[in-house]
Image (cartoon, helix red, strand yellow):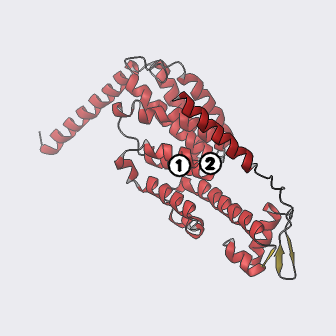
Amino acid sequence: MTSVALYLQRRIGFLERRKQHRRESDEDMDPKLTEITQLFQRFKAALVRNDFDTSSRLLSQLKILLIEFKSLPPLFAETPNAIQEFTLARDIYEHAVVLSVKTEDQDAFERDFFQLKPYYTDVGDRLPQSPQEYPILGLNLLRLLVQIRIAEFHTELELLSAIALENPCIKHAVELEQSFMEGAYNRVLTARQTVPHETYVYFIDLLARTVRDEIAGCSEKAYDSLRVEDACQMLLLSSDQQLSEYIKEEHPEWEVKNGLVVFHKAKESAPCKEIPSLQLINQTLSYARELERIV
């Protein structure tokens, strides 16, 4: 027998054994796991083609089916297929987070992220690390920044490891927060050009809107009016047309006339209440005397 014929015979034998192994694996797999895996493939295909109605419907079915797995949070029961179930559930919730970003649904993002988080924290040491973990953790930090939930932002940051903090997705969110708190709004508004992941664009655009609203709120309190070019520069808008569109959408109470942006705001401030200083001093002294008697 020639060497070529021997090679072909061995190759055919290898392929037959691998095919047999796959058949045995399919037969051994839990039918429920197989059903969810197949449904998940349909969900991913719908998500890729941006069929959000189908994706949302399939996601709801997947979440209901996942309830039947006792190994998943919050039960964490020991089952023969626990690792496979953890991995599949984590993949489903990661895709659910991506779907919520694509549909621009912040409430769904928060729900899906908190369903996903235990797979990074509670069972993360039992699974291979997901390549989507750091991008999604960074997305959550951006969401908190957009919603001005700074305390929660720093709480989430404290929970991350030193390795995570060095990841570009996490560092991007941290640098944005620093720029935002320093008032370096130009760096925030240009951050769209350096996003580390395509899913970040939605929250970056929301953050830019938040920044402009902050600038606009300060401007109308500080000035009665601004020249149009000064308003464009302050709001980091590149043209008068962009300024007109921004005013129409966000601040219809403002007026543009004679080359000025006129801020209409209530001039009357709330009346200042007089502080009863003498009364407070007398009360404090009285408390001090009573404490001396007790001691």
- Residue 31's disc is none
Q: Dot 1, crowdedness within 10 Å: few (<14), some or many (≥20)?
A: many
Q: Position of residue 210 (x, y in %)?
A: 67, 58
- Residue 102's disc is 2
Q: Is residue 67 visible?
A: yes
Decide which of 219, 3 is in the foreground and name it. Answer: 219
Q: Position of residue 23 (x, y in %)?
A: 36, 24
Q: Against 279, is 69 above or below?
A: above
Q: Is residue 237 visible?
A: no
Instruction: Tell me the mark number nearer the camera, choosing from 1 and 2.
Output: 1
* Left or right relative to 58: residue 7: left
- Residue 141's disc is 1
Decide which of 277, 269 is in the foreground and name it. Answer: 277
Q: Position of residue 2 (x, y in %)?
A: 12, 43
Tell me which amino acid carries mark 1.
Leu
Q: Against 102, is 39 above or below?
A: above
* Left or right relative to 124: residue 242: right
Q: Could you tell me which secondary element the residue under label 2 belongs to?
A: helix
What residue is rendered at 33% in x and 29% in y?
19
What residue is rendered at 15% in x and 39% in y?
6
What residue is rendered at 71% in x and 61% in y?
213
Alpha carbon distance from label 1 to label 2: 17 Å
Q: Earlier in the sequence, mark 1 or mark 2?
A: 2
Tell me which amino acid carries mark 2.
Lys
Q: Could you tell me which secondary element the residue under label 1 belongs to?
A: helix
Identify the image quadrant of residue 286: top right
Identify the image quadrant of residue 51: top right
